[in-house]
Amino acid sequence: MSEFEVATLAGSYREPSFDHATVADAMRPGVFTCRADTSLTAVARTMAEHHVHAVVVTDTEFFDRAPDTHVWGVVTDATVLRNGATAVDRTAGGTATRDFVTAHPGDRLADVAATMTDRGASHAVVVDSHGRPVGMLSTLDVAGIIAWGRA
């Protein structure tokens, strides 16, 4: 038994409390992206090979806009599941949700988690100050802060 106690009011340097955490504390850096005309089966393959649950659709050239790296839509594993029987005939752009949650790394995690809950979203796309995707935040990432951070 140790003679010392470690006091952590707002989490630790490794895991902040849920009340004090930012999106950057919980998010997974990096994001898989695809063009809107990518087949849904190719998106499913990427998800399965890399064990990810969401892919961001960024290239809007398919929709008569100049190509860019901004988020246009999100394809989740639930999207793939709903379209399973017709996935071979579908595209990422044709199935992506346009009603997605975005967040910035410095946003308060509790606020983003509340927005995700209110909108029934399992993921939030984390974007930089220019709107480019830089990571993903999932409900499991939030659960990790709740589980290991100090309340």
Image: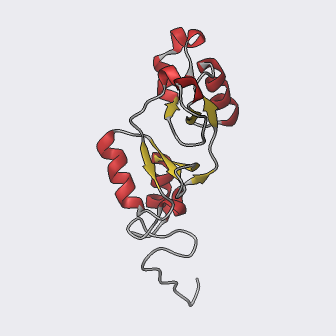
Q: Position of residue 117 (x, y in %)?
A: 33, 45
| The image quarter in which residue 67 lies | top right
Q: Residue furthest bottom?
A: 3
| The image quarter in which residue 53 lies | top right
Q: Is 28 on the left or on the right of 137, as rendered?
A: right
Q: Is 59 on the left or on the right of 126, as rendered?
A: right
Q: Nearer the viewer, residue 92 or 59?
A: 59
Residue found at x 62% / y 26%: 43
Q: Position of residue 77 (x, y in %)?
A: 52, 29
Q: Quadrant of the C terminus?
A: bottom left
Q: Position of residue 93 (x, y in %)?
A: 52, 24
* 54 lies above or below 128: above
Residue found at x 54% / y 31%: 65
Q: Nearer the viewer, residue 108 or 59?
A: 59
Q: Quadrant of the N terminus?
A: bottom right
Q: Position of residue 106 (x, y in %)?
A: 48, 65
